[in-house]
Image (tube, rainbow, N blue to C red):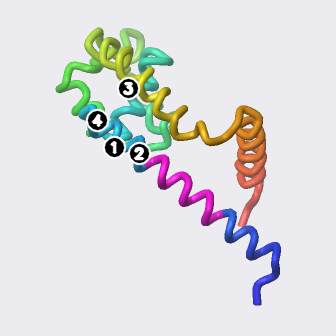
Amino acid sequence: MLAEDTKQSLKLYIVMSRAMKAINEQTTKFFQENGLNPTEFAVLELLFHKGRQPLQQIGSKILLASGSITYVVDKLEKRGFLARVHCPNDRRVTYAEITEAGEAFMAELFPRHEEQLHALLDTLSSDEKDTMIELLKKLGLSIKNLSY
């Protein structure tokens, strides 16, 4: 028989997983309705907010395997949303840079994405959101320090 605190941890995991699944389903639907998948949106959002990025570093910034980045960048480049820019000082480095079309697309899409997230999370009060942010950060940081 599982100890009560172990059962509680399992229940917490299931509840967090189901909540994230529900949120991800809604955001994925929103991205698809706007012609993107979540990874394409993540790349565009990174470039939109952080500017030009080395292709080699995009994967780690959006938590994606580097092999998949080339495919995503190719798709976004074909749509005219980003361009590859070669580094003049180091031929080994290529940057992804958002284009004017990509900027215009994200300037229209991102505020709607923010509104959707707000609507999805609006069942929580501001204080509850602050508490969840604090607790989830604590949990994430503690897990990084574990080794099995």
Q: CA distance from mark 3 to mark 2?
A: 19 Å
Q: Which residue is mark 3?
A: 44
C-alpha separation, residue under disc 2 versus residue under disc 4? 13 Å
Residue situated in front as seen by the camera: 11 or 88: 11
Which residue ends up furthest to the left in the rendered image? 78
Residue shown at the point (74%, 40%) measured from the top left: 128
Q: Which quarter of the figure is the C terminus placed in?
A: bottom right
The alpha-carbon separation of the residues under discs 4 and 3 comes to: 10 Å
x then y, percent, for residue 46: 46, 25
Q: How many marks?
A: 4
The percent position of residue 106, horizontal first and vertical second, equals 36, 19
Q: Which circle marks residue 147 in the picture?
A: none
Residue 126, placed above or below residue 27: above
Q: Is residue 106 left or right of residue 123?
A: left
Residue count near mark 2 (Cα–Cα under 10 Å), binned few <14, some 14–19, many ≥20: some
Which amino acid type is marked by label 2? Gln
Say above or below: 21 vs 56. Answer: below
Looking at the picture, does residue 107 appear above or below residue 45?
Answer: above
Q: CB of mark 4 within 8 Å of CB of mark 3?
A: yes
Q: Which residue is mark 1?
A: 29
Q: Are marks 1 and 2 in contact (CB under 8 Å)?
A: yes
- Label number found at residue 26: 2
Mark identifier at residue 36: 4
Residue found 27% across the figure and 18% down from its top: 83
Q: Main secondary structure of the magenta part?
A: helix
Mark 1 vs mark 4: which is more N-terminal? 1
Element type at marker 2? helix
In magenta segment, residue 128: no
Asked whether the beta carbons under mark 2 and mark 4 sit within 8 Å of each other, the answer is no
Q: Earlier in the sequence, mark 1 or mark 3?
A: 1
